[in-house]
Amino acid sequence: MKNLVLSLVVLGALGQRATAQTAPLSAADKQAIVATLQYFQKNLNDHKFAEMVDYTTPDVTSVNIVGMLWQGEPAVQKGHQIVFDTRYKNMKFPPLDVAALLFRPITPDVVVVVKGSQPLPPGVPPHPQTANTTVLVKRQGRWLIAAFQNTLVDAKEAPNDPVNRQ
Amino acid sequence: MKTCLLVLALLLGAGRAFAQLSPADEAAVRRTVTRITTNFQNHHFADMATYTTPDVSWVNIVGMWWRGRVQVQQAHQAIFDTVFKGVAFTPGKVTVRGIAPGVAVVNLYCHVGAFYPPDGIDHGTNKEGDDDNLLTLVVVKKQGNWLLTAAQNTVVRASAQPANPIGQTSLPEQFDPVKLVDRH
């Protein structure tokens, strides 16, 4: 009976975690999340997307800039491999700009990372930018990408942003 | 002892497996999605507070990034009162999956009628829309309510879809993560 009560307490506590006030992200968790994102960024350049199993959940979803939805790690891996072996074959992506990322803990085990468009530094020629949202979950102590979406930033629309006009 | 083993098995399973939603929770998440799409259709966003977290964020189809409920609500209202004035929004397929206790990710298609940025007026060269949008929505359970906490939207470029390496040239069927082989 004691065991049963203990079990219920443990399971109940797990259920409450999501509804409790979310604590700020610890330095260790942030570091681990950045490492996961950097691993993905590395694959954008070395095209070794077979490694995706190391940093994605089996049910990961990905939406790319033209609205292709890939569901599940095999599809996400295959989609990236083919696109980066063809269209992006000679494309080099810059290192992850951690300062441009917003980290939002949603629960103790879920963090949303958003990268918005950034003004280009003086002298840097205009080039396409993307905004993206990455959802990471902590499973068995590892931060894994569970969902990802990328959107091309239309720079000419920026002055029409209602938030900037206020 | 048996109970302890059962609890251990449950805990290990919870760490590894998909956080499947109960039918009641999935239905509740879908109701939240319906509230979002209802506002798309009626162009009134005043009740966003009833289905979003205060810190909700939104990235729209041209990469505008709104942070916090006030910005997200005001920006939607402003754009739907101008650029999207009179534009029809038709919700399409929805997939819902739990990713952790109390957190779900939704993919939602929505067909958007023709519109004319930036002022909603047809200048002859500014027609957009008449296509599908695809959203990722992150929904979190707070005090028993499923609330939108993050969203991003991307236009589905129809011309690009035949080149989809996964071979989906039409909208996918319901995604069932349980059927995936875990290669991790």
Image: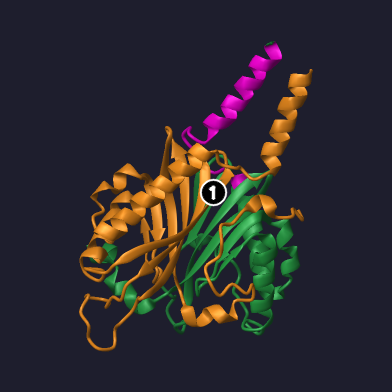
| Relative image position of residue B163 (x, y in whole percent) | 59, 81
| Relative side of B72 to A21, left or right | left
Residue at (52, 44) in percent of width and height: B103
Tell me, what colour scheme is on the image? Answer: by chain
User: Tag 1, which secondary structure?
Assistant: strand
Q: Amino acid at mark 1?
A: Val
| Quadrant for the N terminus of chain A in the image | top right
Residue at (65, 65) in percent of width and height: A76
| Quadrant for the C terminus of chain A in the image | bottom left
Residue at (28, 51) in percent of width and height: B70
Does the magenta stretch mainly form a helix, a strand or a loop? Answer: helix
Q: Is residue B34 visible?
A: yes
Residue at (35, 64) in percent of width and height: B90
| Relative image position of residue A137 (x, y in whole percent) | 60, 48
**Picture quarter containing residue B131?**
bottom left
**Picture quarter containing residue A12?**
top right
Question: Relative to the observer, which residue lies in front, B15 or A94?
Answer: B15
* Residue under label 1: A111
Q: Residue furthest top?
A: A1
| Residue B94 covered by magenta stretch | no
| Relative image position of residue B162 (x, y in whole percent) | 56, 81
Q: Residue furthest bottom?
A: B124
Chain under disc 1 = A
Q: Which chain is green?
A: A
Q: Which chain is orange?
A: B
Q: Which residues are magenta?
A: A2-29
Question: Relative to the observer, which residue lies in front, A33 or B156?
Answer: B156
Crowding at mark 1 (Cα within 10 Å: few <14, some 14-19, many 20+): many
